[in-house]
Every structure is written in structure tokens, then in C-alpha cells.
Amino acid sequence: MTRLRTRRQVLLAPLTTAVVGCTRRRTEVAFAMWSGDEARNRHFRGPVAETLRSRYGLELRILGYGDIAEFISKLLSEKSAGSTAGSADVVWINGENFRLAKQGGVLHGPFADSLPGAALYPAEARRRDFGTPINGLEAPWQKAQFVLGYDTARVQEPPRSLDALAAWARSHPGRFTYIAPPDFTGSAFIRHALLRFDGATGSRYPEASAKALAFLRDLRPFLWRKGETYPPSVREQDRLFANQEIDFAMSYGPAFASERMARGEFPATTRTFVFDEGTLSNYNYLAIPFNAPNLRGALTFIEHLQSFDALLDLSKALKSPFPLDPDKLTARQKTSVEALPRGPATLPDSILAAHALPEPDAEVLVRFEKDWQEQVARG
Amino acid sequence: MKRPADLIALIVLLGAAAIGPLVLLAVWSVSNGWLWPDITPRGYSLRAWEYVFSSASTALPALGTSTGLALTVATASVLLALPAAKTLARHPRFTGRNAIFALLLLPVAAPPLASTLGLHRILLAAGLTDTLAGVALAHLVPALPYATLLLVGSFRRFDPALEALARTLGASPLRVWWSVILPGIAPGLATAFLLAFLVSWGQYLITLVIGGGRVVTLPLELVAFQRGGDDGITAALSLIFVAPCLLAAFVGTRWLRPLR
């Protein structure tokens, strides 16, 4: 086997070098990330790549994925084939993908707790990711939170809790709907219902899920098209909202409404809100694949991304919430965080943070999606 | 068609059906706000195109990679399919013929993820993952069956007597291929090439898994933005994605006409 591989590699060496640029392997750091966002791509291929080059002599290479689950499948397959030569040094990951990667043993580490930047994150960000113990296998990076969007020209005062939203839907039949799970955002909405009935962990699941499913079933006839169908994607839900067929949009990105307004996709009177009881929030993370070709580069890159300045630039570029614990920042740092530009429809970080609920266990999430499919969508 | 008016109406209708979606894509790609109940967009902007052609986007290198890859895969598919198709067409009843057909179709019929991960295993052992060569080899798996099946059809319609005739007149085997067989099956050959090209052009999962994100083709760019819900950039990328297909179809029909 080894001999075969070396011979092939000798034969193909000129080709491989030309194609992959193997000679630069040592100074290259390859980052596997979702690449479907203009602002993010611009930020990484521009300022981030330049800083890495000038400050650390590292060439950043973006490995764009439409869905990181596809990268995890590849890693699992490489692991079972015993391959040690990987393609990525760092992967942007969280939730179910992290659980699968951890279970499959395809992550390098523990490494995250010894990084200097880790201490500035809230403790819970380092402990569990969708209920899965992190054990230092991924380093916290950014923060996201579920928000709802509404048009002030149509709805004066939005319902401020899940129950109030259900009551609103009953008095405005056909004007509300949510995205069908297993879409990420739709799944977050039904998870909120599960949390409402206290079902964050496996032991409470049977009772809580029964109540939550009944709640969603009762809501169904009052939904858009009487709940006979649900929008399959965020895109579709957004379109229904923009076309005034429904009155609420939803997203796991607090800046989504501002972004869409800037692109002219949402009316300029759009605003966002969270429930008084809070909405789901999570951190996303950076991990190192077991077969990362440039381990040292990976650690340097992650350390850089976790630094205060890099996070500030990122929040500025993406208009995303700032992830570090405000209590652990210096007065000057706090001032610069508070001065971050926010879109007209985006809630301030402090309001979001005061209304953040932790995600239930990743395993509960998968079960609930399935139960919803069987008992609400088809029931 | 009975009357020229009917014919013209039909052509206009078919043309609209073919061009309509493309026009819509073009408008989407430059619109800035197109909300119900507006009939035309509220504003126009070149934001999507500016991004696609900027250094932050990999769309242009991806276009180059996709084109090179699809041309290579189509050429290799046709070259590999020619001898196989000739044998399968000329010997309709040898043992194992059906088994060979089944094997040929298996990669197309099997669930894509399963066959892709299997391929990944093999190419991993050969040290060819994350390379353009590996991706090209992997694209052959779905492209080859189509090329072969199409050429089997062409060979069935091609009279073997012509070949024998050329041989009795003293033509070398190479000459027979070049001057008799290839011109005789040219339309099928072109169609097989075109189909293999398009199969490679449209691959997403294989490219992603075998190429490891290092080999970036247009579908990779397109799917990421489609999932991100950015209508403008998705529309712009879609237009770039269909452009070579239209060109290929146009050139194909042009080139095939005198041979029919």
C-alpha cells in the first residue's frame, strides 16, 4: 500500500504540485467554512487574509462548503480509510456537526482551553455546544441568536412571547407560519416550543415533547394555507414576508432584517424582536481536523480569530453580535464594542444577551424534528 | 404544420418558454428590491455582478476550472466509450452482456452519497483526493455510462458492411476509424461529448468530496449562495452557469445540421 502510494505520488508529483501548490503547504492555512455569504467572503478573502500574511506569514486558503456536514462526512470517510493527509487545517463548526465529529473522533485536541482568547468568553460557551460537552475540542468563536422580523407598517406591536404569538396567529388566521424542519431556522422555532414546555434534556423529553407537539398541532389550522404546507426554506419564508402573505419573518442571525433591507428585499419599515422569555442562542466554534496538514498554522489562525481586535473587525463587517463576555472586557474595549455599527432593524447586543436561552441537547433536537414530521406535519 | 402562422406562434411560444426564465434571472441579478406587488424592480444595482467579478469571489477561477474539467471529462469519456460501445453494439448476445450494462448503469442508479464516499475511499488510497486529476477521474464515473449508451445506439445504426468495404479496398484500421467509422457516427459522437460535458458541468457532491474544497467549480459557488438566500448573486452565478451550456447547445446544433 505504502509503496503503491509513493510510486503514484512520484508519477503524479509534477501535476499535483502544479494543481494544489503542495510546496506552499507549510505556510498555508486552509479554512473550511460555509461560503454563501458575500460580506463574510469579502472579509475573509480581504482583510483577514492580508493580516495573516503580513503578521504571521500565513497564506489563508478558503475551502468553501455549501454545508459543513459535507466536510464532516469527508473527514469520517478519511478517518475510516486511515488517511493522515487532510485538506483543511481549521473548520467552522457547531451543534449536530460537532456532535458527529466528536463521536467519530475526527477532531484534534483538546486544544481550546489553553488558548489565551478563550478566557474572555462566557464560561457556558466553553462548556457545552447544543448540550454536547466540548472538552476543549473546539474553540468558541461567534455568537448567534434567534430573532423574529415584522413590518411596523403592518403590525404595530409584535407579540412578545410564544404564547402571545400563538394567540396572535389565532386572531389573524393565515398570517403566520414557520419554516418546515429540518431546515435549520424552522427547527430552531419548534425547539423554542419544546423549551417552552421545559424539554431541554432527554429525561424530560417524553412529557415536554407531547405538550409541545400538541401546542404546534393546535396552532396548525391558523397558519398560512391552514398549515397544509410550510415554507421549506428561509428564502421562501422571507419571500412570503416580503410579499405580504405573512406578517413575521425569522432568522438565527440577529442582523438578517437589516441585511435584507439594505439589499432592498425587505420593506424599510421592517424591525426585529425577541420574546420576553428569551430566544435560542448559540455559539459557533473553530475546530481542527485530526488530519490537519498545518497544525501550528491552525493554532495561530484560531488564536488570531479569537483575539479582541479580530472579533471586533468581524462584528463590524458582518454586523453580528459581539461574542465576548462584556464583564471581562476593559473599559476601553467596552466602548469600542458599544460603538459597533448596527443596522436599523438590529437589536442592541445588550438586549439580545439579556434574552438569550441555551440550546437543548443536539440529540433531543434530532428526535423532536422527527416527531414533528410524524405528528404535526403529517398528523 | 399546416399554416406558417401556426408555426410562427409555436416558435414564439417555445422561444418564450426557453428564454423567459433566463430573462428573469438577468433581471434578478441586477434588481435591488423586487417586492410584491411591483411589476418591475424598485431599483437596480450591479452589486451582485460587482461581487462575482471581485477578488473576494472565486466565480471566475471556478468558471475556468469547470470548463477545463468538463472538456477533459467529455474527451476522456468519448475516447473510453468508443471501443466499449462498438463491442457492445456489434456483439448483441455474448455472455455477461447484461451484467456489463448493469454495471455501467450502477453509478448512475446508486444513491449519490454512497457512490461518492466509495469513490472517495478509492481515490484516497491512490493519493488523488484534493486534486484536479482526482476530480476528473471521479467525474468519469457518472459521465461514462451516458457516453457509452449513446454511442451503442450510434453503432447499432451504423452499417458494419461499410467498414468491411473500406478494409477490402485496402484501408488501414486507423484509416477505417478516421475516414469511415467516426464520420458515420459523428452526430452520436457529438451528442455523447455534449452530454458527458454537461454531466461533469453539473456535478456538485463528487467535486466537493473528492476535491475537498480545493477544486472549486461553479456548482460549488452556486449552491453555497443558493443556500445563503442571496437572490442577486445566485441569479448572477446561475447565468454564468448556464451560459456555456447554451453555447454548447447552439454550436452543437449548428455543427450537426449538415450531417443529418
Image (cartoon, coloured by chain):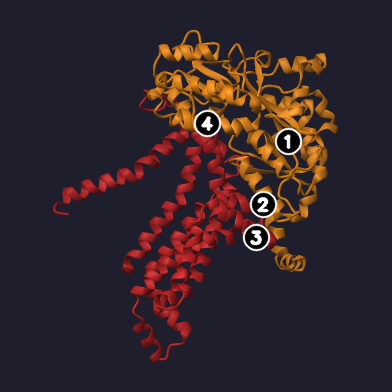
Chain colours: A orange, B red
Is A323 or A301 nearer to us in this picture? A323
Q: Chain of mark 2?
A: A
Q: Where residue A286 is drawn, which disc sits there?
A: 1
The answer to whether dots 1 and 3 both sit on one chain is no
Camera sees residue A269: no
Residue type, label 2: Ser
Q: Earlier in the sequence, mark 1 or mark 4?
A: 1
Direction from residue B101 to residue A192 in the image, left or right: right
Q: Residue B156's x, y, as percent?
A: 36, 74
Question: What residue did someone put label 4 on?
Answer: A371
Question: What residue did someone put label 2 on?
Answer: A77
CA gap between label 1 and label 4 equals: 31 Å
Q: Residue A100's x, y, as percent?
A: 67, 40
Direction from residue A276 to residue B96 in the image, left or right: left
Looking at the image, is mark 1 or mark 4 nearer the viewer?
4
Q: Earlier in the sequence, mark 2 or mark 1?
A: 2
Looking at the image, is mark 2 or mark 4 nearer the viewer?
4
Looking at the image, is mark 3 or mark 2 nearer the viewer?
2
Question: What residue did someone put label 3 on?
Answer: B123
Q: Residue A336's x, y, as percent?
A: 75, 17
- Mark 4: few/some/many CA within 10 Å (<14, 14-19, 20+): some
Q: As displayed, is residue B191 above or below residue A252?
A: below
Element type where label 3 sits in the image: helix
